Amino acid sequence: MKRTLEKIALLCAAGIVTIGISGCSDVVDLDKVYFTKNMQLTSQFGGLGVEWGAYEDTNKITSEAWQRVLNHVDRLKPAKVRLMINYDWFCQNFDDKGNEDRSDDTWTYNFSNKWMENTIEILTYCQENNIQVAFGSWNVIGSMSDDVWGMMEDVSSDLRWAKISGDVLDFLVNKKGFTCIRYFVNTNEPNYRGIQGSSKNYNNTYEKWEQGVRNVRQKFDELGLDNIGIVGGDTTGLAGSIEYLSGISKNIPTLVGDYGVHMYVSNYYIDTGLLEGQIRDIYQMVKDNDKRLGDSIQANIWEAGLVDGKNVATDSNTLIATYNYGLRMADYTIQCVLAGINSVVYWNLDDAMHFMYRADGSSNPKEWGMFSSLTAAPANKHELRPWYHSSVLMTNLFRPDDHLFSSQTNNVELDDTFRAIASVSHNQKRGGIAAVNRGIQTVTKTFAIEEEISDADEIYVYTYNERSMRLGSDGYIIPNQIITGSLNKRITVDIPANTLLVLSTTRL
Amino acid sequence: MEKKKLLLITPTLLALLLPAMLLSSCDGSAKEDEYDGDKLIVSLRNLYFDAWSGGDNYTDYIENNFKLKLGLSNYSWADWTTQVNGAINGNNVEDVFHFNLDSYNFASTYEYWVEGEIIKALPEDMSAWPHIQSLLANTSNIDALTIDGKMYGIPIAKNIKNPETTFAPFTYVYRRDWARDLGVYQENDVYTWEQFNALIHAFNLRLQNDPNMVAAIGDVEWGFPSVTNFYKDSPHCFTKNSSDEVVSNFHSAKYVEGLNVAKDMVARQYYYQNQYSSKDGEMNKRYAAQKLGILYENLSYTNYNKLRTDYIRNYPAVDVDDATAIMKVKGPDGKFALEGTENWFSMTFFDAEISDNKQKKVLDLMDWLLSEDGTRFAMYGIEGYDYDMINNEPVLKDVDEYKNKTNGAKYLRYMTTLGYDTLSYDPLVNQDSLTIVNDWTAEMSEARENNQMRIFEEDPEVRWLSSPLKNQHSGRMLSNANSYVTQYAFNNLTNIEAYYSQLNRDPWESVLAEINAKLG
């Protein structure tokens, strides 16, 4: 059945429309979404990315499935990848010499196992495709039941943490050549202490984490790993990150590579447009301490997801396969960008990466991915989920070093149901617009970008909602329409309710 | 190695510290109030927090409005007692914690904790919290929980709107479709004792032609042997004889008569032969896998709905109503028999070391959650976003979307009530399951009113009596007795004398003497 396409009216002008600022008038015409030069958000966007690996058990996927994973990543084209491992996978033959002095502890590394094989595979892909990687170990070494290392008291401030981190990064960067690793994660979510007896992080404090950063930075500098910045925080939750962001921005702003957090957000904050303001408040708090924010240092979201639908027992999201998940993640991204965030990394690529293990020996894959490559997963889970397709639109449209723009219509007080941002590439050869209509009615909006996009006379129109999304024979998203025109000229579009609209000067 | 840091008190720092200092506890409590901004940090631990870890906007709303920063954790059912005692013994109990208090652990926990100043009494004047006050006033046998005129926790009400329910939903679910096929079905699922036995016999014959079946009947692990319900006067250790003297239930003629019926059923292989070694939840799974014809279980709404949900998912071709019909059995005396129960289950406690201020703020939250506004928030979320008021009734905008949300308010409400009051209008409740459970409850209530039901329970004055030997021994006596019952039923104790002999290894005589002396 031929899909019904949304009506698009194209108003042609003789030349490029000059979009003037409204001047003395305070009235904003919400139907005119003009991205003017004075509404530039950034001239050095960091791009969008995804959490990819390392896979806890590659035995559970076939080589054919792995090829499909690579094809999907090809199409997704992430600018950043967060790749996390466990040091426990590689560190062996621990010997504490029978004393309390940790400086004489020894151990060896086994980098010849399936985990390093997978890590190298992913890093190879990232290196070849110019993807920046944030790399780290989830936790310190040791098992809850038999903690021979004794690292859980001092956590990352333990001097052995910096040594291991240095050794591993030295191996990967200096010896294997993976210069794509640009960020180091100094343990995952250090502010989430968990439950005593179950969490390796229970004894952590900001002070210990900060000392860990100092130790790691010194070690990295000794090894010539100057090009790797330490993620400033990697903490979870906006409110929960305040202590760390405040401490970092006051105490060690020059020792970190960015200000990074994880955010799993309730639908409510996204749907109502309130997320932008929440992020902006904390962004400003950091910027008050570190004036470089937004210029020589950026704020990034290193794990982005939604909390509604989360099943705590299985650590999966029951809504991950819904269209609305994709729409909300796009809206989430737009609000982050409006608030000053430079990169958003989506959690996550593939269900097959991580498992939830239980005391009775059972386990389940953590289903937060854009698909599953698990051999044992039912066929429908192998299919690309809707939010993969919406993410493809976003990641392909908003590239590193793009100039991003807002519009005066992005005002939650005036309209909390519509948001839009625009991009123009650094060389001004391509650009696009992403807009979300979160209302219950179709809206008609006229768009235009003031910054010139040269040699771009086609507009690819993508309409992402449950009724309209189009997939090609290869299973990937294709435009609903291709029209002749320029985004520097006014283009009027009807946007159905609950829709992500993407207009691009290039095929995404 | 961490260096100790010297704190330089600057005027700026003093200005920042002063409000926090002023807001700190001033009542001499050991745990000082700590703040996250303007929010008082409070740790909460509850069995029912297992599916929620905060982070939702509903929890944010509560934190912002009540100026609380909630630290949440839960217990596992199997380790609940160990986890509570471990925290208490390790002096790291949460500010507000949850424990499965019952009459058999009352002395070793509640009384002990009061004496050891481990738990904090509720304020004497609870008028600031009218909903909690009302809950307490309607708590069954509340006097037993009062020590020197004080309450040291909040009994978690099953149903604050209907506190009068006096029997537990421990009863039989069965395969009505099989009964029909075998010609032993009885109208409205009501069975006389003879008809019940005929049904079990017919199911046992069916077993020979159904390789999937393992037995006609099985009891939930803690409920074996359910058939004694139709004979005994008390569910646990103590009952009264005709002279109003407290005696051992497990030694009583009535109990032993019922026990012999169970032994006979085991011998005939009516009962699942590995009943005695089944672990938690296994019998339920067997019924859900069509391996049993009858299951004795706690048919709370939650358990019953899960059973039905499992059948719908796993056996869509089976009529779920017929597969999970609730059987109503009359005993040899021609009456239904159900276990008596308190109208509450488990209690919420406050750590004795928290400040009065912290306790007050938590009570404020609890009371609000019991109010009309709080209950609506817990059930429906945010007006205008999750629901609209239509004809004065909340109507969800998108039920399917709401079902997948986590509303922290609903979980927090479990600190004071199991929420049976909201089941009838909770948008996430399966009304088909609830209707069946409610119909059964109504029918049993009517039977009780018409003297068609026998409720067996320990006399409250015995149940909640605190005396040294009873406190010291009754928990172990109960546990041992249950073991001997199972051994006798499954012929590991081959005769009744052996059963009595085992029982008598425990100090029944001295415990009973003490109880009777204390009761006068």
Image: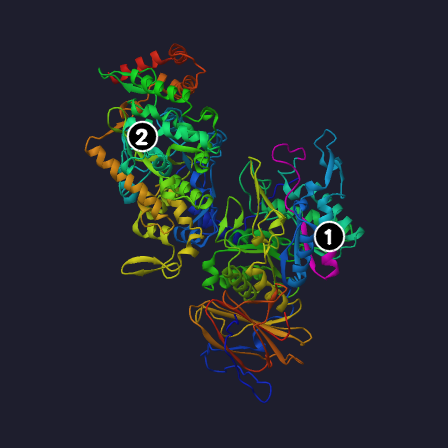
Q: Is residue A464 left or right of residue A51?
A: left
Colour scheme of the rendered structure: rainbow
Tag shown at residue B145: 2
Pointer 1 residue: A121
Start-end of magenta stretch: A120-149
Kind of residue at disc 2: Leu
Q: Is residue A6 left or right of residue A41?
A: left
Dot 1 alpha-carbon crowd within 10 angstroms: few under 14, some 14 to 19, many 20 or more: few
Q: Residue B406 location in percent, x, y?
A: 44, 50
In this rendering, the answer to whether B442 lies above or below B262 is below
> In terms of depth relative to the viewer, which is nearer, A113 or B317?
B317
Q: Quadrant of the C terminus of chain A?
A: bottom right
Q: Which of the two marks, 1 or 2, is nearer to us in this view? A: 1
| Quarter location, residue B116 | top left
In this rendering, the answer to whether A18 lies above or below A473 is below
Count all numbered tags in the image, as a single digit.
Answer: 2
Q: What residue sits 55% from the left and 52% below the top?
A: A241
Dot 2 alpha-carbon crowd within 10 angstroms: few under 14, some 14 to 19, many 20 or more: many
Kind of residue at disc 1: Glu
**Magenta region includes residue B311:** no
